[in-house]
Image (spheres, helix red, strand yellow):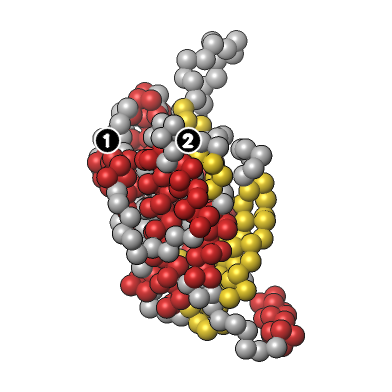
Amino acid sequence: MGLRGAGLEINPFLVWFSSVKFRHFSPATIEKARSLGAVIAVASSADGAPSVEPPPIHNVERWWNDAELRFLCRLKKCILDTSDEGTDERDLLLVAFCRVVIALSNAAFNHQSMSFKTTHEAPQLFAFTRDNADVFRKELTLVLDGAADNPRIEPSVVTGDAREPSRFLHDRFDMLITSPPYPNRISYIRELRPYMYWLGFLTNGRDAGEYDWQAIGGTWGVATSRLTDWKPSGKAFTPPDLKKALAGIADPKNDNGSLLANYVAKYFEDMWRHLSDIGTVLTEEAEVHYVVGNSTFYGTLLPVEAIFKSMLQEAGFHDVEIVKIRKRNSKAELFEFDVTGKKNQPTIHPTVREDRRSEARRSSRR
Ligand SMILES: C[S@@+](CC[C@H](N)C(=O)[O-])C[C@H]1O[C@@H](n2cnc3c(N)ncnc32)[C@H](O)[C@@H]1O
């Protein structure tokens, strides 16, 4: 829409990926990537073509069957040999590569979190052999068509920790929109592992757990054992809804109840750090939108939206409201909400504000 924007993200792979999505690509760059891709597709099909080592991901054979794994090793080598380091073409080819990594894998993403397809299916009447190079061609076409649809202004993405926004962002923003991690035990590292290992952002399982521990809401690998020993700092604002839910989750009759209560308490302590600092990088008229989902633990409903509302109010935001956006696919009581607020009480009359907004919308259409 031609509006200036910036993102703050802790995961280096996602920073790279969003920087590619945000970039402006010239028609010449896209054409160059297309012609390199055509050469790469042919070269990587040959069985004896040079290849890189398979990624050091645990149980690699569970992720890819032998033929697919060997093809991916050749494809990556070919991309590295054919394109120059640091170029836009290489980035586009690598995004297509990421899509092929998943297209050829045994991973299934039809649930809330990733699982594996059963690989030993019954033999079929007509044997189906997939042309892996063709998969690459198709994915590259899709990526290049998307890349041609350029943003009007390149947004920026900053590597940093949203618990301390003022440390990483040195600008003032009039609108904040985010879908932060939810307290629902989704691990972004777990989901993103295949890309991160193939592109060299991860080289071992220990670092994967370490990254997850740094992320808000991570509970994977080493993050789980650290949560067991985690103690609240005592500095975070804890609204009554949160206290009540923590007591319900920690009930001794719940196996792992105290671990999960720690998980939830740490999640909100991290969010409190974010919410109590974010005002520093917002203009006086700024509006915030936190898109969050609620969750349940052992039948205890965690009213995430209400806790965000109390925290925003405690952090000094005004006109804080909860808007129910949609139902989640899973349990009946789970929804997604937009928790909104304003940094300061409106100082201009609402009709003047609406006039200004309509003007902004008109000029963005122009
Ligand atoms: C549901 S996704 C949404 C991403 C999207 N950029 C947005 O804000 O709507 C949540 C993202 O938060 C990132 N994240 C987790 N902990 C973070 C932290 N401490 N600082 C910055 N980003 C973090 C995760 O890596 C993940 O990409």
Q: Residues within 10 Å of mark 1 (few under 14, many from 20)?
A: some
Residue visible at 52% across and 68% down? 312
Residue visible at 42% across and 78% down? 280
Indicate the quadrant containing the C terminus: top left, top right, bottom left or bottom right: bottom right
Residue 232, how many percent across, how many down?
A: 33, 55
Q: Is mark 1 within 8 Å of ligand 1?
A: no
Read off the residue under disc 1.
56
Mark 1 falls on what kind of element?
Answer: loop
- Out of 210 and 278, give the one closest to the viewer: 278
Residue 282, how many percent across, how many down?
A: 48, 78
Q: Report which quarter residue 223 is drawn in.
A: top left
First of labels 2, 1 by sequence position: 1
Residue 319, how many percent across, how many down?
A: 62, 74
Read off the residue under disc 2.
114
Residue 26, how many percent across, how many down?
A: 50, 66
Residue visible at 64% across and 62% down? 322
The amino acid at mark 2 is Met
Q: Report which quarter residue 202 is drawn in.
A: top left
